[in-house]
Image (spheres, rainbow, N blue to C red):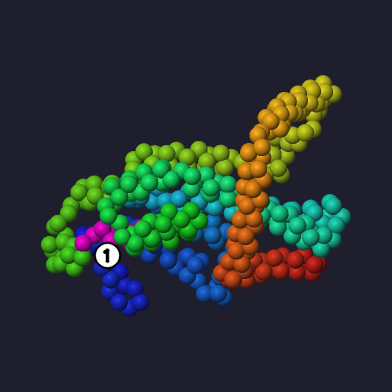
Amino acid sequence: MKNRAMIQHSENFFPAECGELLALLVKYYKDNPAVKGDKELKGVTAQNIYTFYKEMMEDIDKLPEEIKNMVYVLPSHFTTNRISIWIKRLVPIMTQFILSYVDEQGEDIGALLQRLCVDIDKANYNLFWNYKFISIARQANEEEAKKFERWMDFEYGDRDDIKTELERRINEMNASIDVAIAELIKRLMLDVSKERILDDQNIYDNKIDRKEYYNYLNAYTNSGDVNIKKETLNRYTNGAKTWKIIEEKIIEDNYMPEDVHLTYESELQARKEYISELKKKLDFAEKDLERFKNCGDDYIKKYNQDTEEFVKNINTEYLEKCERVRNGEKKLTEWTDKYISQVIWEFLNKK
């Protein structure tokens, strides 16, 4: 089995292992917003992205089980499903937020920009701060990392720098699913000898039958990992697709805000439960304070030194990150600028 593709007027041969995945990319190539010119890209909407991903994901589900499993374990497969569910919902919700802030709050749109700047800037730093704690926890678990490396060596054999880099890109969570599949094809090709691609076609076609071919592909996935990913995706999808915006809840279920109670009795009970929870939290906080007050002098000295150094390091890394974003994400900055500017301009000039 051999696949042939024409790329930039040259003839390219791909091993059978890449056949179905390559066909998928070719089918959706012309619809991919990433390959459109800037002029066409300006017309890309949430609906375009939704349709592109939804149809591709449906075709992925139709692939042979062994090939489908290789795609299912890609982190970007889960991300793409989430995008397909939420992207169309975001636009009307954001529009409602902008209008509600100005109309209901009686504020001008400049006040909205002020709130977004202050709140999002604080959220940026808090996200970075929280990420550093997670990163430190990961680094502390070096033994598990070594076990993972040994498992990768066992699964894939000796890995050179090219394979390692491909595996990093394949496991990128926020890569477009078609990009991740393209990287997976490159990874597959590294494990196929040049002889199988370049030798006489008749010899190649008879060298491996379909059953043997699928058995070969099974080596690229762990059945337990596949099942976990499928189960996680199913549970998430079932929950996310049944989520309703408040407008829908009002229409269907006579929606009632969580903190509002129809009867005096229910309001009274809610207040009692609220106070009970506060007392539990206060009791825990007081006990924790006593433990903290009784720490020894060595702990206090180390705490002061470590905390000061930790905050200094995080702030330094945050400045570096801001600089990287400013200099390395110029395209993203450009499109964010266009998006925000068009929203504000449209609002100020609506009739």
**Quadrant showing the C terminus:** bottom right
**Residue 338, above or below 269:** below
Q: Secondary structure at mark 1?
A: strand
**Residue 250, above or below 290:** below
Residue 185 seen anywhere in this rendered image of the structure: no
Residue 78 in percent (x, y) is at: 48, 48
10 Å neighbourhood of mark 1: few (<14), some, or many (≥20)?
Answer: many
Majority SS type along the magenta span: helix
Q: Which residues are magenta?
A: 184-193
How many callouts does the rendering have?
1
Q: 69 and 305: which one is in front?
A: 305
Residue 246 seen anywhere in this rendered image of the structure: yes
Quickly name the residue at label 1. 14
Q: Residue at x 13, y 63 (%)?
A: 202
Residue 35 in percent (x, y) is at: 47, 70
Residue 131 in percent (x, y) is at: 58, 50
